[in-house]
Each structure stands twice: as C-alpha cells, then as structure tokens.
C-alpha cells in the first residue's frame, strides 16, 4: 500500500538471496501448467515512473525505456474523458498495459460518513479502470481498526468482517457494471483474505464475474511456516487462484531476528521469496497478469529490483515483454 511508511533496506543478504533464487531455477521442481498453447508467455513487468511526464505518449514511452510493459494508472480523474481516452490510446499504442487503479482507503471505516465516502472513491476507481483500460481496481478489504486504516483488529478475522467485505464488493461491482475491468482485494496477513483458501471462499461468495484476485504473496506470509515454505504457498496460490489472478505485486521479505516474529519488506533480491517459482507460475497463466514493483523509495532501488527479477527470469528460461 502506497500510504505505508518506507523503510531503509539492508544490503548484506543480497548475495545469498540471489544465489538461492538463481540456483532454484535448476533444482528440478515439478513442472507447472503452461500458458496458452502449452508455452510460458512473456512476463509483463511494471513499476512507477519518477518525475512522470504529463503527456500520455511520453509517459508510455518512459515505461518502455525502463523495460516495463505494465503501468500503474496515471493520475487522471473520471471527469476527464478526453484525457482518459488519450492515456488509453497512448498506452495501447506503445504496448503498455495499465495493470491497476489503486484506491487505498478503508471500506470498513468505523465512521459512517468516511465509510460512505471511501465506498464512493473505490466505486469511481473501478469505473475509471473500465474506462481507461486498466485490468483491475484494487483495494484492501478494509479494517475495523479505529485508528490505522489498514491495521489489525480481532474482528478482521470474523464472519462479520467476511460478510461486510462481500457486500462491499457486490455494491461496487453492481454500481459500475464493468465491461472489462475487475475489482479485487489485496490480501493482508491480519485480515481476510489472508490465505488462498479464504480468497477462494470470498470469490465464490461475492459471486460476480467482475471480482478477481490481486496476488501479493508476501502479504500472506504471516507465520514462520509460510516464510520458510513460501514455495509451497506460491504454488498453492497459483493452483487455487490462478484463473482469477488479474495482477500481482513484486516485493520480498526478510526476517529480523528479535524475541518475537518480525518480517520486514525489502526489495526483490534481498529477501527469501522464491522468485523462480513465482515467475514460472506467473508466466504459465494464459491471461498474462502483470507483475508490479512497489514500496521502494528511489528510482535506483526500483532499477535494482527490476534487474534482479529479469536476471532470475532469464536464468529460469523466461522472457519479458
């Protein structure tokens, strides 16, 4: 979530993490389902643009110059139809897919007025995604925490929470009736959906074709078992959620050793996420869900993250669009 505080990332684990990821490419894992035509398809990697140009063509080209074939939605209002059309046409012309419209607000805010305003914000976000050609509008499901919009709360794992977020998803989708874009929730480690099984249950409960899955596997790592067995978690995500995945986030996790469990986000290549499996399974999806870098502070960090993912992908025999 782009409203979270950025943290300084450590460098001393890079060598070991990179070697682990690259070596896993040749570790003889079980074959994953291939994409359309029995082939793994080129991955669409994307990320934010620093000092982004306002001109739609120049912005699309700025993505291509960085090796990106996917983008976050440009800053444009739903009330600017001409500019929406210009962005949609320019990005299509230069082969850049708009992966997501992020609307990071609390759909379960304890204040009724704020909750209604947030529902309107996300509904308009889905409408914008459909107009501009984005694959999906994404938010977290929300939180009953009264002070931190994404924070933990005991009721975030309750039937009351589940029912409320299902109702919200239906309201948003039914209000927009999108023709192309999906609406999705990003998983969180302390709120539903926090696992592939909970996500599948939520998709079936919402019962709308326009409800998809936004995959951020790091957000599901909420125990030592999932941290050490994140390869199993990744395979479970793709096995159970693959057909619904519309976009993905790319980051990494390390474990700061304290007297209790403390996982910390780091850039890809500095943590323990099995990117070989992540990229192989992603490339096997026929719908070609983009992989979006996030939560880094500088253009240099994003370039380092991009280089790491591309190197791991190439070592695994994968290509990028």
Image (cartoon, rainbow, N blue to C red):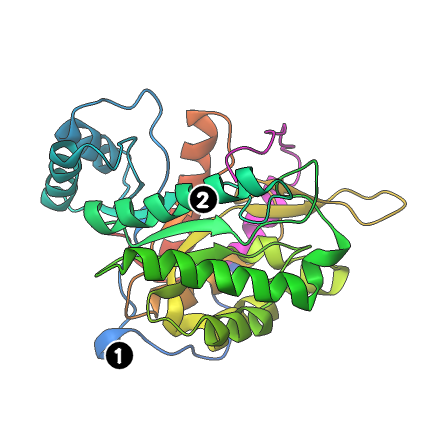
- Secondary element under disc 1, as helix, strand or loop, is helix
Task: Give x and y (percent) for residue 259.
Answer: 90, 45
Observer-side mark, 1 or 2, equals 1
Q: Residue at x 58, y 50 (%)?
A: 142
- Which badge, 1 or 2, comes first in the chain's sequence? 1
The residue identified by callout 1 is: 38
Q: Residue at x 16, y 47 (%)?
A: 95
Q: Which mark is residue 308?
A: 2
Q: Is residue 232 visible?
A: yes
Q: Count the numbered circles shown.
A: 2
Task: Give x and y (percent) for residue 99.
Answer: 31, 49
Task: Give x and y (percent) for residue 318.
Answer: 33, 60
The local crowd at label 2, few if under 14, some if 14 to 19, many if 20 or more residues have their Cα within 10 Å, is many
User: Where is residue 64, by image quadrant?
Assistant: top left
Q: Where is 247 relative to 197, above or below?
A: above
The one nearer the camera, 161 or 240, is 161
């Amino acid at each position: 979530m782009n409203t979270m505080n950025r943290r300084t990332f450590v460098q001393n684990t890079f060598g070991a993490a990179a070697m682990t990821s690259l070596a896993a490419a040749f570790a003889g894992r079980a074959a994953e389902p291939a994409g359309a035509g029995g082939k793994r398809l080129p991955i669409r990697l994307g990320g934010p643009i620093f000092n982004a140009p306002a001109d739609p063509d120049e912005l699309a080209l700025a993505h291509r110059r960085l090796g990106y074939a996917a983008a976050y939605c440009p800053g444009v209002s739903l009330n600017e139809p001409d500019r929406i059309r210009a962005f949609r046409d320019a990005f299509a012309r230069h082969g850049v897919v708009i992966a997501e419209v992020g609307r990071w607000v609390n759909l379960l805010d304890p204040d009724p007025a704020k909750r209604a305003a947030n529902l309107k914000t996300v509904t308009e976000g889905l409408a914008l995604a459909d107009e501009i050609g984005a694959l999906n509008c994404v938010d977290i499901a929300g939180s009953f925490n009264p002070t931190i919009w994404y924070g933990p709360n005991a009721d975030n794992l309750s039937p009351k929470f589940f029912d409320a977020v299902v109702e919200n998803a239906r309201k948003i989708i039914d209000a927009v009736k999108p023709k192309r874009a999906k609406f999705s929730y990003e998983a969180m480690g302390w709120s539903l959906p926090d696992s592939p099984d909970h996500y599948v249950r939520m998709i079936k409960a919402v019962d709308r074709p326009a409800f998809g899955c936004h995959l951020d596997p790091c957000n599901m790592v909420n125990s030592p078992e999932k941290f050490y067995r994140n390869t199993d978690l990744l395979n479970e995500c793709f096995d159970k959620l693959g057909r619904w995945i519309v976009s993905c986030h790319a980051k990494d996790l390390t474990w700061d050793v304290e007297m209790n469990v403390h996982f910390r986000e780091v850039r890809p290549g500095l943590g323990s996420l099995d990117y070989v499996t992540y990229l192989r399974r992603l490339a096997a999806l026929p719908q070609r869900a983009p992989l979006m870098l996030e939560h880094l502070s500088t253009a240099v960090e994003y370039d380092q993250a991009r280089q790491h993912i591309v190197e791991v992908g190439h070592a695994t025999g994968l290509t990028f669009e």
